[in-house]
Image (tube, rainbow, N blue to C red):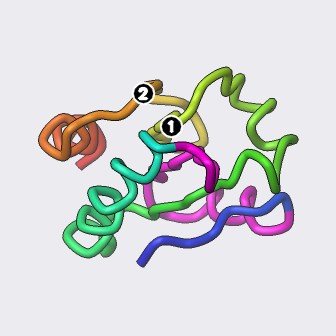
Amino acid sequence: MVTVGTSENFDAILNGDKPVFVDFWATWCGPCRMVSPFVEQLAEQYGDRIAFVKVDVDEEPGLAQRFRVASIPNLVLLKDGEIVEQSAGARPKAMLEQMLQQVL
């Protein structure tokens, strides 16, 4: 399951007991729509071990600014509240899966 990240729930997710994978995106972003199915598939596969969050940068500009998101899609992997890896631009599913392996 992918959770919609908001300024109200984000810190609670970040402070949970799982690593967190965040997809910063927007509805108008073509590459974001390309990555979205991969994020959904990975959430089904790894959701028991990693929390998956999607943050709409238009709805939550404060969260985007907090992570210095300059371009989207912007994918951020966090463990214990610290950034493990951050990647801008569309990536193939295999590359996203490699990213996740760092926290498993």
Amino acid type, label 1: Pro
Residue at point 35% right, 49% down? Answer: 35
Q: Please, which residue is most extreme toward the left here?
A: 94
Judging by the rendered image, the residue that carries numbered circle 2 is: 89
- Label count reads 2
Q: Is residue 64 left or right of residue 71?
A: right
Q: Quadrant of residue 9?
A: bottom right
The numbered dot on residue 48 is none
Q: For residue 23: magenta?
A: yes
The numbered dot on residue 73 is 1
Q: Is residue 15 left or right of residue 91?
A: right
Most foreground residue, 76 or 25: 25
Q: Quadrant of residue 1?
A: bottom left
Is disc 1 placed on a helix, strand or loop? loop
- The magenta region covers 8-29
Q: Is residue 72 above or below residue 38?
A: above
Can you give x and y, in whole percent of width and height, for residue 84 in the image?
43, 29
Residue at point 62% right, 49% down? Answer: 28
Callout 1–callout 2 Cβ contact below 8 Å? yes
Is disc 2 placed on a helix, strand or loop? loop
Can you give x and y, in whole percent of width and height, for residue 3 in the image?
56, 72
Residue at point 43% right, 25% down? Answer: 87
What's the CA distance linking mark 1 and mark 2? 5 Å
Q: For residue 71: magenta?
A: no
Q: Quadrant of residue 89?
A: top left
